[in-house]
Image (spheres, rainbow, N blue to C red):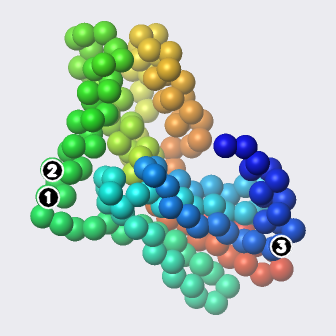
Amino acid sequence: MGGYERLCSLYEKYGVLGNFSGHMHIQDAKTNNKGLTEVATSALSVSPFQYGVLDINGNTLDYHTETLSFSHYDEAKQFMWDVSYRKAEEGLPQGYAELYEYFADVNTAYFSGHKEEIRWDDALYEELNKNNAFFGLYLKSIKADGLLDETKCRIHWHNSHRRT
């Protein structure tokens, strides 16, 4: 990717308080140390099939996601988990169903933006990392980013602004 620091300096120069975009898969919300909030809403075509909603009230902007409701929602949601499970089966030795499930749970929560739902387990993580270093680095990056709910945020602005 690259260019993030330059982009942030341009945002700061022109007084941009937030950047809202879409993403091909994951839901993500971040605020940098200078107060710029960036929200990438996950693709509507990927579980949990959500879209972003902005509510503006005075000097406050609230963002949250809402999920589509449709007749095959549960099957489509299960499909996302199943794909993650199969990916773990392909990348880990046979007979590690508990690790496959753990990977699928973490990956599904990560994609949805509901990382607060991740039940982090150091023992399972270590076992997974021992058997597949790439999966280990991937899960480590998810945890290092913070196990937070990234489906909502609030931005306040005045002369200075902040996100809660």
Tell me the residue at 32%/57% (across/down): 45
Depth check, front residue: 128 or 44: 44
Q: Are marks 3 and 2 in contact (CB under 8 Å)?
A: no
Q: How many marks do you count on the picture?
A: 3
Tell me the crowding category of disc 2: few under 14, some 14 to 19, or many 20 or more residues within 10 angstroms, Cα based.
few
User: Looking at the image, is mark 3 or mark 2 earlier in the sequence?
Assistant: 3
Q: Is residue 95 above or below residue 71?
A: above
- What amino acid type is highlighted by mark number 2? Glu
Residue on which the image places disc 1: 72
Q: Amino acid at mark 1?
A: His
- The answer to whether 33 appears left or right of 21 in the picture is right
Measure the alpha-carbon separation of dots 3 and 1: 45 Å
At label 3, counting other C-alpha atoms closer than 10 Å, the crowd grade (few under 14, some 14-19, many 20 or more) is few
Secondary structure state at the residue bearing disc 2? helix
The residue under the point 57% across, 85% down is: 56
Q: Amino acid at mark 3?
A: Tyr
Q: Which residue is mark 2?
A: 75
Q: Are marks 2 and 1 in contact (CB under 8 Å)?
A: yes
Determine the image quadrant of residue 141.
top right
Q: Is residue 157 left or right of residue 90?
A: right
For the residue pair 162 and 108, the one nearer the viewer reads as 108
Residue 13 picture quarter:
bottom right
Q: Report the quarter where the N terminus lies.
A: top right
Q: Residue furthest bottom?
A: 58
Task: Tell me if residue 101 can be seen.
Answer: no
- Expressed as whole percent of the image width and height from the top left, the position of residue 29 reads 57, 57
Of all residues shown, which one is farthest toward the right? 13
Residue where numbered disc 3 is placed: 14
Which residue is at a point 36% across and 61% down the rendered structure image? 44
Work out whether mark 3 precedes mark 1 in sequence or the reverse, and give the earlier one: 3
Q: Position of residue 74 (x, y in %)?
A: 17, 54
